[in-house]
Image: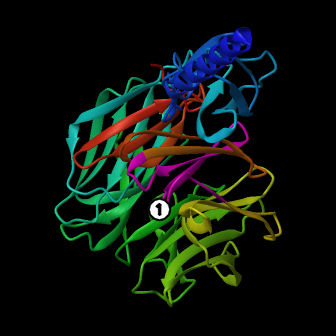
Amino acid sequence: MKISIYLSLYMLALFTSCKKEAKKLPLPDEITLSQHNISLLPKDDLQLNILNSNDYPVNWNIKKGKGLIDNMGKYTAPEDVNDHTLVEVWLKDHPNIYDSCWISTVKNNADTYIKDLDFIKHNSIDGASSCLIDENTIAFALYERMGYSSFNIFFLDEKASFKRSLNFGYGSCKKIKYDENKIIAIGASGISLDTAMIIKTSAKGELSWQTKLNGFEPNDFAITKDKKYLVIVDNSILFKVNEMGVVEWEKQFEEPTVYYANSFIQITESGDILIVRCAWLDHQYETKLYKLNSKGERLGYDLLTKNLDCTDFKIDSNGDVYLSGHGLGSEHGWNYYLLKLDSNFNTVYEKSYGMSSFDSCSEMVFVNEELVLIGWTGSDNVAICKVKKNGELVYWKEYIEGYAHSAVVTKELNIQMFCNNRSDVRVIRTDMYGNIKP
């Protein structure tokens, strides 16, 4: 009987002790990875920082991606991870406690950085344009719609250090391109930015000619195979300018609009002209694709979508068409948006990407047969999104506060973005996986 009582008391004490001990083991509020968006070699380790991990019996699982994680929160990259993967770890039985990061199994030897351009101050930037001159030089320009701004083109070296600049008086530069030792730029000239203009210089900046066009705001331009220039002005008129700066013709392809609009131009392999115009009409965006022959005569148009505020337009080597921007396409609200058409202009897919409401995509570039979309998030951080041509997400990454307007892909496949925040212009240079060296 006594033994039974003692045993009962012992079991009660043990139960009470375990119960009290359990109260000392709270769930962690969150987990955080010690580094985000990092590069690892296979079998390298990434230590997770798990709050309260010393007090809680850890049982972490890989929810997404590949790799191993031990009960101390150490992640080990596997050998078969190809280039990069999204790894999401979570607490077993508590899937709301998790965190994720992008892991690259390619060593990050690229020259990457974030650098403010102290030699530039601005009031309000509405866009930017950039192009690669050679392996050591990148040219860029800032577009401002405010009066009394300057029509400038800046040149940087591979470290984003200032090399030189060109100034063409009052105005603002909208787009620049480099073609066979020539720089072509379009913009608005004058104190009040009231005249569209196209400029041609040598690679060193010596002016060849500048030509004023009938209209106010230039939108985009393309270079033909015979080295002539097709310029869209006021979202409604197309100009053809020859290699000497003489206007050969101007054609109106659409009625002008007093509302917000964006227009972009590309030339097909056959020489036909494609123009995408996105306009705000009847309380929604309306994106149309216009087809013109080489003489500027309109052959027809297609209404593509009413979901997309288009900010860029590209054609790949297969003739497939890509339109990027921001659109209403997911449960998050307005996000990066990508519309793909085949060479016959049939819709292949419409996809959206983003992590929060009001993510804004400004430009798209090709990197090794993949697409990189740049812009900013609803919380005003620079964001980059890389996708495969089939629309599959490769990665989404965010950086410091700012707005990315233009990007250049270097010969080493680094991605260089030109950004601004409230008072500064800065360059963010990543490797091809979006990583920046810590």
Is 338 left, or right, of 114 in this rendering?
Answer: right
Tell me the colour scheme of the image.
Answer: rainbow
- Decide which of 294, 393 is in the foreground and name it: 393
Residue 332 x %, y %: 56, 61
Residue 274 x %, y %: 66, 70
- Decide which of 68, 191 is in the foreground and name it: 68
Residue lying at 45% horizontally and 40% vertically, measured from the top left? 417
Q: Which residue is mark 1?
A: 358
Q: Is residue 349 above or below residue 52?
A: below
Is 330 left, or right, of 340 in this rendering?
Answer: left
Is 163 left, or right, of 47 in this rendering?
Answer: left
**Residue 41 lies in quadrant:** top right
Q: Which residues are magenta?
A: 352-381
Quarter occupied by the C terminus: top left
- Per the image, label 1 sits on a secondary structure element best described as loop
Query: Which kind of residue does numbered mark 1 sit on?
Result: Phe
Q: Is residue 204 visible?
A: no
